[in-house]
Amino acid sequence: MTIVFTIIIFVETMMLVNSSESEKLNEDELASSLEEFGLSKYEARAYTTLVGRGSLSASEVAYYSNLPRTKIYLTLKKLEKKKLSNITQQKPLICNAIAPRDAFGEMVLLYERRLKNMKRIIEELQKKNDNGTNTIGTEEKKYHIFEARKVSEQLYDMIQKTRYSIYAIVDQWGLKILSKYNYLLNSLSKEIEIKILLCHKCLNNESTHSFSKDIQIRIGNVFSNMIIIDSNKLFNIDESNGRGALFSSLDVFGNSYLRAFNREWTNGLDINNFDKTN
């Protein structure tokens, strides 16, 4: 729920950005926040400038955003492709920003749907838990919590020790973390089975194309950020605070996620086929 409120607050704040010097620090902070939503540093700064100043020429965007003029045209083209801006004139190139509520409205809805799905899963698990506590003979299961600064170290250790399979389901935020180990995953891909399910927003992410062809990648419905190792260990990462939870055995909770992954993987679209259909 925290991430949904964060996005909503961010969109509301973007509507208040103007070109005054007193807002300069705020614009820099907003640009940095945009990078967390999958934009590059140049794209984030250009979009923030357009929001605050309205229609501008390419050279004006470069000037106010303090971006290299040699990079500005490609940056503006990428913003238009991501449906964050409109190019209203080609020579000279003039563009303006799509209103933040329109540009990020779909993202807000996506996280709201994801939150709804997570609540449903938790309710189902709670029912199973309640039923289990009423039966004779119970078994306590434990999991380990890792602080954000320890998540990368733990993930690297798990990947390195994989014996035969890695199944990952990640959104843009999760892809950013997973792509840090693309060299390790690529080296393992000839020896073990690796499946990565990505959200549609990851299609234009450069990290998506950094993985080996031996790694299976599909686009589908992403409901969490998790990695399943050898079908018996589950590592779930909370994007709202960066903390991770490790389940060393897949019982009721873990098997629910494994079944969910298999279902979404079956319904997903191979990334190569997706490229052919677009």
Image: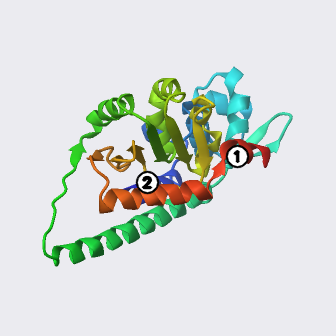
123 shown above or below 2? below
Mark sitting on residue 224: 2
30 shown above or below 1? above
225, 239: nearer the viewer: 225
Q: Residues within 10 Å of mark 1 (few under 14, many from 20)?
A: many
Instruction: Say which element carries label 2.
Output: loop
Q: Label 1, on which residue?
A: 96
Q: Is residue 206 visible?
A: yes
8 shown above or below 67? below
Label 1 is placed on what type of residue?
A: Asn
Label 2 is placed on what type of residue?
A: Ser
Q: Residues within 10 Å of mark 2 (few under 14, many from 20)?
A: many
Report which quarter residue 100 is drawn in. bottom right
70 shown above or below 263? above
Q: CA distance from mark 2 to mark 1?
A: 34 Å
User: Residue sitting at 84 percent across and 38 percent down?
Assistant: 90
Instruction: Say which element carries label 1.
Output: strand
Q: Quadrant of the N terminus?
A: bottom left
Mark sitting on residue 251: none
Question: Of callouts 2 and 1, which one flags the residue occurring earlier in the amino acid sequence?
Answer: 1
